[in-house]
Image (tube, grey):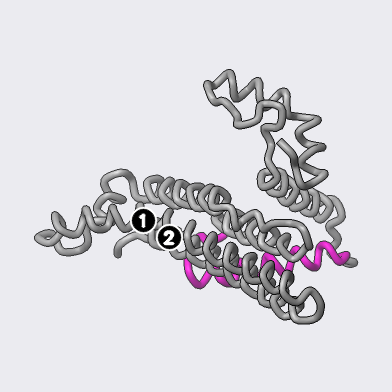
Amino acid sequence: MAHSYSITQFLDHLFGPAITAFLNLIGIQPADPAYPINDTFALELMVAGCLILFFIIVRMTLSVEKPNAAQQIAEMIHEFSGSHAEQIIGHNYERFQAFTTCVFLFIVFCNLLGLIPGIVTPTSNPVVPLGIAVCTFVYYNFYGFKEQGFVGYMKHFAGPIWWIAPLLFPIEIISNLARVMSLTIRLYANMFASDLVTLVFFSLVPVGVPVIFLGLHAGVSLIQAYVFMLLSMIYLGIATAHEH
């Protein structure tokens, strides 16, 4: 299987045999045993690794008197996500801020990779948005059960009026499950369309005009990451809200 990116070849060279052996051990047969890591997954790993490295650097160079550029950027991101989390989630929002911030940053940088010529945006592959959506779904439902208990969280889907609960409960359960599909399709469709439009105009008019669509791609990338973060916060706020 030929790979487009050097990082994919590098990762497959280092970890390919071990990953293939592990997948075979659990009964999964990779499409190409010699190259189990594809380009999309390699880009995801690169983004995750860069974010981890960035925050390690920030942690190791923290300074109250002379904050460096990395610390200032981290503080801006923290204030940005924190202000939204406080308004949407409310009380004790701090414990969810790390997750929602990581989701936002991961999606932003995966989206923006599409600005580099020759690289396909990872989030234009439906598997990537689906993975983030499933993680978000599991995360907010876990805290819903943890905060309200099994019975309390199930009552949350039944609504406040007991006699309409038998009708409302299955509708709310289906609506809750559909959030995975909604989060996935929204991110995937927008990034796939943005990639496609940019590619078409690069093919038709390779000079000048495509810059406009690169700017459009950057705008769509930021907006979609922002919307995903907001929806994650909204779902967390609903799942952990207590009735008074």
x, y percent for residue 87: 50, 72
Relative placement, left or right, of 55 versus 92 is right
| Residue range (magenta) | 67-94
Label 1 crowd (10 A; few <14 / some 14-19 / many >=20): few
Secondary structure at numbered mark 2: helix
Q: Residues within 10 Å of mark 2 (few under 14, many from 20)?
A: some
**Which is more toward the observer, 223 or 58?**
223
Q: Main secondary structure of the magenta part?
A: helix
Task: Please give the name of the residue rendered at 74% of the width and 66% of the height, measured from the top-left corner.
Answer: 115
Q: Is residue 75 above or below residue 132?
A: below
Q: Which mark is residue 178?
A: 1
Q: Position of residue 162 (x, y in %)?
A: 13, 59
- Pointer 1 with pointer 2, Cβ within 8 A: yes
**Disc 2 designates what residue?**
182
Q: How many marks?
A: 2
Q: Is residue 145 something one can see in this rendering?
A: yes
| Quadrant showing the C terminus | bottom left
Residue 196 % position (x, y) = 62, 66
